[in-house]
Amino acid sequence: MSVGALLLGAAALWASSRLVWFAESADGGVRGTVLRTQTGAERSGALIPLAVLALAGVAGMVATGGWPRRLLGGVLVAAGVAACWVALSGLRFGGHPEGAPVAEMYAAHGLAVAGGALIVVGGLLGLRKAGRMPRLGAKYSAPGAKRAERDPGTELWDALSDGEDPTTRS
């Protein structure tokens, strides 16, 4: 669940960085007044690095456990809040020049807020379920108490594996 939220959040931030975030009328010299637009990546340099951080967080959530996963969860929560801040700080209502892609600009900011919120959710899930979520290679490490217990049903097979004849045992 945490990994899915982080993947969707990273995808939303990346998609938002490709859309138009800002438009203004500029003097085009001989051409007169022209509409100048900027994408999210041009307007805010933080969107793509935050998306990459969320992708790295996916690998970190899968590979770690315990307190490192909690630390990563806290970093991801902060990154999600930063993404929301970037999206909301550049948003303005009204005063757009004629011909500006206003719907696309609102959609881009909304997508960035949604991506930031998903990253926050992924980080919070990592914080909350750090001890219960499976981690990479966990199926190969058995706790000492489980290793010490012997299952009576497998004693014969274990004896064969050790090179002993289980039928001669008393």
Image (cartoon, helix red, strand yellow):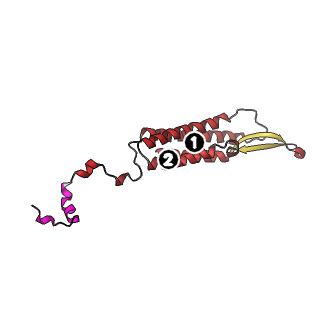
Image point (53%, 49%), residue name? 56
Occupied quadrant, residue 23: top right
Cα–Cα gap, marks 2 and 1: 12 Å
Residue interval drawn in magenta: 152-170
* Residue 142 in view (yes/no): yes
Residue drawn at x 52%, y 38% as measured from the top left:
77
How many residues crowd around disc 2 within 10 Å: few (fewer than 14), some, or many (20 or more)? few
The residue under label 1 is which amino acid type?
Answer: Gly
Q: Residue 105, located in which quarter of the rendered image?
A: top right
Name the residue carrying label 2.
4
- Viewer-nearest residue: 155 or 13: 155
Answer with left or right where residue 94 lies relative to residue 133: right
Judge left or right: residue 81 versus residue 96.
left
Q: Residue furthest right?
A: 30
SS for dot 1: helix
Work out whether 166 lies above or below 78: below
- Residue 7: in sight, yes or no? no
- Where residue 133 sits: x, y (%)? 40, 45
- Residue lying furthest left in this view? 170
* In the image, residue 24 lies in the stretch drawn in magenta: no
Label placed on residue 115: 1
- The amino acid at mark 2 is Gly
